[in-house]
Image: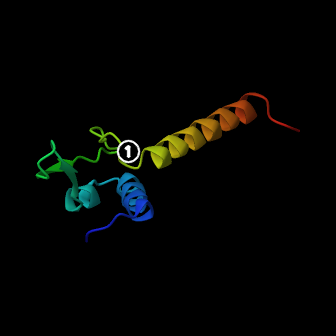
Amino acid sequence: VETHSEHLLNRLRLNSAKDISGALREQIQILFVEQRGNDWRATVRALQLDEYGGIADWPDGFFDSTQEELQALANISIAKMRNEFEDPKT
């Protein structure tokens, strides 16, 4: 499937992270096509998903704002959960 959908990519990442066996991750291949130089040649590079749904070799400019917003949301959620755990409301 070829897509420019951040939603689809993130859903694949999420489902891959949920799959404890790692079998789904082995079935997913993410290919990133990028232009090299000014001669309009393109290169294709495989991006690797880790066990947490992360992409270690995230390309510059590849859905950057979404990734940053998701990371910020996760950080805020974790901080709030830690705060509630340390200071539970009664």
Residue 25 rendering spot, x and y as whole percentages: 26, 56
Can you give x and y, in whole percent of width and height, for residue 7 in the image?
45, 63
Q: Residue at x 73, y 28 (%)?
A: 86
**Residue reaching furthest to the bottom:** 1
> Is 58 drawn above or below residue 43 in the view shown?
above
For this view, does 62 lie left or right of residue 37? right
In this rendered view, identify the residue nearer to me: 31 or 19: 31
Number of numbered discs: 1
The part of the image, by quadrant, that contains residue 83 is top right
- 77 relative to 22 in the view: left or right: right
The answer to whether residue 2 is left or right of residue 83 is left
Q: Please state which amino acid type lies under the numbered disc 1.
A: Tyr
Residue that mark 1 sits on: 52
**The C terminus sits in image quarter:** top right
Q: Quick one: which residue is furthest to the right in this view?
A: 90
Residue 67 drawn above or below residue 27: above
Percent across and percent down for residue 8 are 40, 65
Q: Is residue 6 above or below residue 56?
A: below
Question: Mark 1 falls on what kind of element?
Answer: loop
Q: In front here: 65 or 54?
A: 65
Percent position (x, y) of residue 15?
Answer: 39, 60
